[in-house]
Image: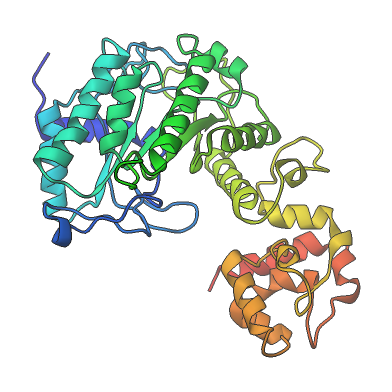
Amino acid sequence: MATLSVREKLAILSDAAKYDASCASSGSAKRDSLRSGGIGSTEGSGICHSYAPDGRRISLLKILLTNFCIYDCSYCINRSSSNVRRARFSVDEVVKLTMDFYRRNYIEGLFLSSGVIHSPDETMGEMVEVARRLRIEEKFGGYIHLKTIPEASAELIEKAGLYADRLSINVELPTDEGVKKLAPEKKPETIRLSMAKLRRKIEEKAEPTLQSRRRERFAPGGQSTQMIVGADKTSDDGILRASARLYGSYHLRRVYYSAFSPIPDSSSSLPSQKPPLMREHRLYQADWLMRFYGFSQPEILAGSNDGMLDLAIDPKLAWALRNRGRFPVDINRAEREALLRVPGLGTKVTDRIVETRRHRRLRLEDVGRLCHSVAKVRPFIVAEDWSPGALTDKAGLRQAITRSCEQLSLF
């Protein structure tokens, strides 16, 4: 086998890493290299690999340590039986790449994942060593996210938390049955146990010590997880149910959804979906409703015939159209919680409305200046000079809103 150059390895292992959903560094402790010495800083606003669902931009060196893997998960392009070009970085190479890219201002941090080589502990040990050398030897203060391996020892996971800003353990699929069928070498109970241990460790380290009265540093950005969607037949309702349980059980910062698309030489038993990226996008939007808009998981798809999110419109608009009896709401009187349910009103716009109406009553024109599209909002609100009348219950309301939004997107 020919020896690969670092550039060739980078091409292979950065491409292989695109199937791992990266996350932001929000929640990480702020570090300023000008004050602490060393190199690299993090900011509270966070870094992302490209564009997160909330619109923030993140800049990471996102790579796999290796795409060799002893596991044969049906949905994974890097599974042991897959005919892909393989490569493996050394610890030295990852450290040098990270520092070189950072000094050239290409990146703000590192997202490191890996296939499992030889054993979980051997692989996890090398990933931890990368983080240790960056922090201790290179004095790197930038963001580090390690994708940890559930089967790795507790000692290695604890060491990872000392150096990384965020740790993540993949749940793989929404259901235990899906994992057992498509990734039989992985055990759902092991994954859950590892996530529970990590949660306890994060909570333990967050408590001030008796001696110093200071909190110990341990994965300040918390833990997240990734879920493959579309590799089995779980409905969107089932996926959101699984996510709600994960948030409640492990206090996750994020659940990341990764759309499954059929891959070369994949098993014919795996379902195809269309279009996978739009489904992923709608799931992120529904997840956002649960986390920031006061929606409970059951109500997002209550009344849906098939338990699937509507790909043509966003889930808040779909919910509003199924629950027209709760509208219109008075923009000048309604509680913040009711305003958050109005299609087209985000959290920032809602807060501005609540603040502005303390000083004067809002007209429809005022709302239009605050929000992105008044066409989506208008049928669901009452303002000082506006009442939708029968518009809220109009049979063709969905089509009218969709056409208006499509027209706006042209300009």
The number of numbered discs placed on residues in the rendered structure image is: 0
Determine the residue positioned at 16% across, 50% down.
Answer: 102
Viewer-nearest residue: 277 or 323: 323
Looking at the picture, how far across and down is residue 361, in whole percent?
73, 88
Q: How is the image coloured?
A: rainbow
Quadrant that contains the N terminus: top left
Residue 308 found in image quarter = top right
Q: Is residue 106 visible?
A: yes
Vertical side of 120 occupied by 220: above or below: below
Residue 111 found in image quarter = top left
Residue 229 found in image quarter = top right
Viewer-nearest residue: 142 or 99: 142
Looking at the picture, how far across and down is residue 193, in whole percent?
49, 20
Viewer-nearest residue: 250 or 18: 250
Determine the residue positioned at 56% across, 19% down.
Answer: 270
Toward the bottom, the furthest residue is 360
Determine the residue positioned at 85% across, 67% down.
Answer: 392
Q: Is residue 115 visible?
A: no
Looking at the picture, how far across and down is residue 62, in whole percent?
28, 40
